[in-house]
Image (cartoon, rainbow, N blue to C red):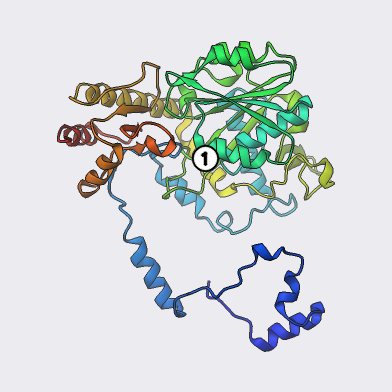
Amino acid sequence: MPFISNTDEQRQKMLKEIGVEKFTDLLVHIPPKFIQDHHIEMDEPLSEMEISQKIARLGNKNIADANSFLGGGIYDHFIPAAVDHILLKPEFHTAYTPYQAEVSQGTLQYIYEYQSLICEITGMDISNAGMYDAATASAEAILMAVRKTKKNKAIITGTIHPTYLKVIETYTTGVGAVLVVIPAKDGATDLEELNNTIDNDTACVLVQTPNFLGHIEDMFAIEEITHSAKKALLIVAVDPIALQLVNCPSEYRADIVVGEAQGLGNGMNFGGPLLGFLATTEKLVRSMPGRIVGATLDAKGEKAYALTLQAREQHIRRAKATSNICSNDALCGLAATVYMSLMGKEGLRQVAEHSASKAHYLAEEIDKLEGFELPYTQPFFKEFAIKTPIPAQQIIDNFREKKIFPGIDLARFGFAENMLLIAVTEKKSKADMDELIAAFKEVR
């Protein structure tokens, strides 16, 4: 929307009403080291038309039609046209997340359906209304475990997404949680090290499966180790698409399940917005962050929806709140709800099967190429790492002219400089994959 500025006269009137003489009087409680004391060089002001044109030119620099094998937490799954069509209905497409029961029965109903579908996929008892993304959902799950167990040691397996770990470190700063990271072994959790580290002071163990490298963890073994410690909770971060083929968390007695639902009807969008989810068992529901929508009957005996649990600081005393989540990615949650409803169980399973089979075809073909090698033997779902004959970033730079994104340079995350992380979804045709293989053949 166009920007409407305040005049000097209006600003002086507001300052007078507040009771100060100048704007800087409002900053007296901010330490001087945090205040910018020099002039910021900015471009000359532009009109609405000019800024729109400038943004369009910048947007055109994006390569939107590349043959992309990027993943690392955000995936290019097919989105049925009906998803966006429903999302753009004006009653849903709003800048605000409406949830007051007296005016937003439609919104509350689809959040209720979203929660029900997340529970069906994960096998858990209850889901909240949504989270910002998988990283913050993982952090909230750890805080949830610390509150419930009254212990402060959180063990995190070293195969978790590195950015999830950074978010967790930020979230848990200042709350007394002690994070212990178990190093990875051959691309998976080091079970022996986990067994040696866990003790009765442990609040939880957090593990991701498929993990950052795409490998499927031995969750039954991890569960046995986790629950050998008194009161320790098992938190698992999952890919909802993968759950169509691998054991669901309830089968290996997970206590809290989190994950990234971007792949359920939400585009990659150059990195966001994302959609985290969190589900748990009934006995832990009072420790959950966020809010939960439930179904009930109104005064006329007709079905109605309402917030049945809302332990946020907006609703209750801050000291008693389970989180400060003031909203959730409701529009993204609607997209996921529509997507799962349209695809159904069989459709979701086909997405998973195609993604897995195509990823394994590509991995096997790349492994045959001279100079390329699969560095791990762990089972994987739709994502895998490869060793390359030259630095991975050099390959990425060279392939840009071919409009191919071959994967993610793992050196960014502390791995060797000659490793790529490649993701494959059901959208990839054999021609797409063969194009990447042919390009790799030319690498010297």
Q: Residue furthest bottom?
A: 9
Quarter of the image where one finds residue 110: top right
Quarter of the image where one finds residue 171: top right
- 4 with respect to 44 (left or right): right
Q: Quadrant of the C terminus?
A: top left
In the image, 370 versus 54, the foreground residue is 370
Q: Position of residue 266 (x, y in %)?
A: 46, 44
Q: Is residue 181 visible?
A: yes
The image shows residue 361, relative to residue 39, as above or below, that is above
- 301 with respect to 183 (left or right): right
Helix, strand or loop under label 1: helix
Q: How many marks?
A: 1
Instruction: Please give the residue where the numbered disc 1 appears in the rendered image.
Output: 336
In the image, 261 versus 418, the foreground residue is 418
Image point (46%, 30%), residue name = 212
Q: Is residue 341 visible?
A: no
In the image, 376 versus 261, the foreground residue is 376
The image shows residue 254, relative to residue 93, as above or below, that is above
Image point (23%, 30%), residue name = 389
Amino acid at pointer 1 = Ala
Counting other residues with Cα less than 10 Å from the Cα at mark 1, is it few (<14), some (14-19), or many (20 or more)?
many
Q: Position of residue 429 (x, y in %)?
A: 25, 34
In the image, 95 versus 27, the foreground residue is 27
- 2 with respect to 54 (left or right): right
Image point (78%, 47%), residue name = 313
Q: Position of residue 157 (x, y in %)?
A: 55, 24
